[in-house]
Amino acid sequence: MLVTPVLGLSIGQHAAISYITRPGREELGLLLHDYLGATIASALLVGACAVVALLPPGRWGRQDADPATAGGESGSPRPAGGRISLLSVAVALLLVPAAILILESLIASPLFQDRYVLYGEAGTALLAGAGACRAGRWLAAAVRRPQLVVAPGLAVCLCFALVQLAAQRSARTPGSRQYNFGGPSFYVGANARSGDGVLFMDTFYRKAELGYPRDFAKTSDFALAISPAAAGSFRGIDKPFTAIQALLLSYQRIWVIGDRPSPRLPAALPREESQLLHDDFTQVILRHYKGIWLTLWIRRQ
């Protein structure tokens, strides 16, 4: 009953994912990073546990056997009789959603983003846990100490946490981000005057205003024609240059965020606005943040 309304809403908001490109090596590497951990050591550790979980019973059957159950080996998550098993759920969860979205993005409109399939991490966790549990049964059977069944699992959890400490700390610092939207926003918030204009040198950089709206309270985003909410994307839609030109010349001070204004910018960027700034304004502030330039231009008298 809810499919039709949801489909209608989704079609109306398709512009929100217009920025997605076809997946390549970088996107696949990020997906592996999400699924296996932040370091090579964590990936090897998780991978080793998954291999243990996927090993066939074979000669391990004696160590895997559990006298408390019947009809199959409990140390291996492979039930008898073809029933749904932990392995079937884990492998499907790990591979199927990501594979479908990647394949769709290669042959049709790109939709793949690693965050859309992050729940596949649960498949990795299930496999790693099953492998650690199986290794625990082997260890307990080998030394005839049932209490040691939990030792491999505890060791895996501890090692996994330790090998990722530095990477996890780094991921939570501003330096790990490709773009620093906070830096220029805070500077504008501290130094802007009422009535200043702000020009984003590509609608992509409007994310700064969306993320830190209070810092742009004194400024006017005069190039914006359709707001991000109305456009169905975080970028919004800008006015044509003919409309921007008259507005730009009406401001005494204009903050520019994004690429450095230059008449030699690529055609896809606001090159005409850059030319007008150089012709009629003087640059008085130039600051660089990770991935972003911030400049302030004052109109010549």
Image: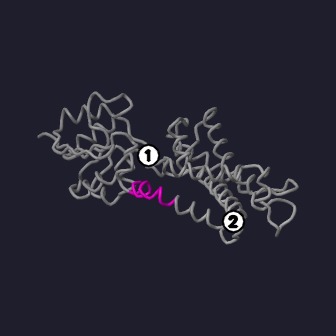
User: Horizontal and vertical percent for residue 270?
Assistant: 33, 34
Q: Which residue corresponds to mark 1?
A: 236
Q: Position of residue 225 (x, y in %)?
A: 40, 44
Let me know if residue 168 is in the magenta part.
yes
Mark 2 crowdedness (10 Å alpha carbons): few <14, some 14-19, many ≥20: few
Q: Nearer the viewer, residue 122 or 153?
A: 153
Residue occupying the point 59% across, 52% down? 46
> In the rendered view of the protein, which quadrant contains the N terminus?
bottom right
- Label 2 SS: helix
Quadrant of the rendered image containing residue 295: top left
The range drawn in magenta is 160-172
Q: Name the amino acid, label 1.
A: Gly
Q: In the displayed structure, would residue 128 be above or below residue 297?
A: below
Relative depth, front residue between 233 and 29: 29
Q: How many C-alpha atoms fall within 10 Å of the one at disc 1: few (<14), some, or many (≥20)?
A: many
> In the displayed image of the protein, which residue is found farthest to the left?
301
- Residue linked to disc 2: 143
The three-letter amino acid code for the residue at tag 2 is Val
* Residue 112 image offset from top left, x and y in percent: 58, 42
Looking at the image, is mark 2 or mark 1 nearer the viewer? 2
Q: Secondary structure at mark 1?
A: loop
Q: Main secondary structure of the magenta part?
A: helix
Along the line of sight, the residue nearer the viewer: 298 or 156:
156
